[in-house]
Image (cartoon, rainbow, N blue to C red):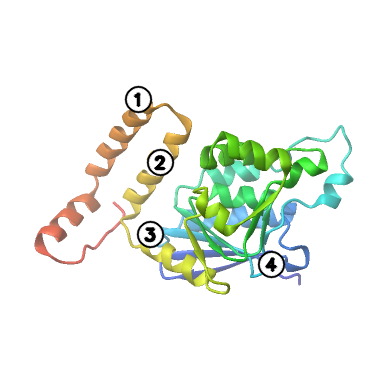
Amino acid sequence: MAEPLILTETHGRVGLCRLNRPEARNALSPGLREELAEAVERFDGDEDIGCILIAGNDEAFAAGADVRALAERDLTEELSPSETFWRRLASVRTPMIAGVSGWALGGGCELALLCDMIVASETAEFGQPEITLAIIPGGGGTQRLARTVGKARAMELVLTGRRFDAREALEMGMVNRVTKKGAWLDEGLELAAVVARRPPLASRLAKEAILTAEETGLTAGVEAERRLFGVAMATEDRVEAMQAFLEKRKPDFQGR
């Protein structure tokens, strides 16, 4: 029986998805994409999970698409067979963190950018090298990179295809934390555990509000925030949190 392409674990309220195709540096094959989407969606539907951590191994987060498969495709084939995969992950409401060590190139960089936060090892190497293969990113890389690091930097990185390390990614605001070699997974789990301890409905509403900022103007974004604030105010968790604060005790969130 073949080993699964995605290994899953639970650490308290954290769901961990580890890409498991080391012989190909976790290249995003169709099978791996499908297993990852299914694993993330299972965690997203689990009320006991408050944060999802997506990780690879020490050598590679994900090296991108399978170039051999791309090279063999006929010009008349569908241009973006992985489109459904990116839409499925983008629709996940639970906060997601990418734990990156080693290569995060092409689709791997796009996968990290799709997550809500990134914890990177000092060995991490990011890049959108598609231009060197006479194509462009197809999993949201141009859009998310531009929104994260700005137009000028995104233009340089996409049009040259150059790779950049974790420290540069941190300076550009793409990465949240850079860790020593070997400490990236523990750091990712630690950050995920903090997020997972927060009230789950409020966390999802906060994620939705922040993502709205990427897609709308300020006026529309503020209106969306006010609407989501009203939803949060109507939850039992909000009543519990404020009562616990006044009573100087730990809140007991029920996700309602």
Q: CA distance from mark 1 to mark 3?
A: 28 Å
Q: Residues within 10 Å of mark 4 (few under 14, many from 20)?
A: few
User: Which residue is drawn at the image coordinates 53% and 68% (left, top)?
Assistant: 184
Q: Earlier in the sequence, mark 4 or mark 1?
A: 4
Q: Quadrant of residue 155?
A: top right
**Residue 47 coordinates in the image, percent (x, y):** 40, 58
Q: CA distance from mark 4 to mark 1?
A: 46 Å
Q: Residues within 10 Å of mark 3 (few under 14, many from 20)?
A: many
Q: CA distance from mark 2 to mark 1?
A: 14 Å
Q: Which residue is mark 2?
A: 210
Q: Residues within 10 Å of mark 1 (few under 14, many from 20)?
A: few
Q: CA distance from mark 2 to mark 4?
A: 34 Å
Q: Earlier in the sequence, mark 4 or mark 3?
A: 4
222 or 94: nearer the eye? 222
86 or 63: nearer the eye? 63
Q: Which residue is mark 3?
A: 195
**Residue 120 coordinates in the image, percent (x, y):** 55, 62
User: Which residue is drawn at the image coordinates 68% and 49% (left, top)?
Assistant: 107
Q: Which residue is mark 1?
A: 219
Q: Quadrant of residue 166?
A: bottom right
Q: Which residue is mark 4?
A: 4
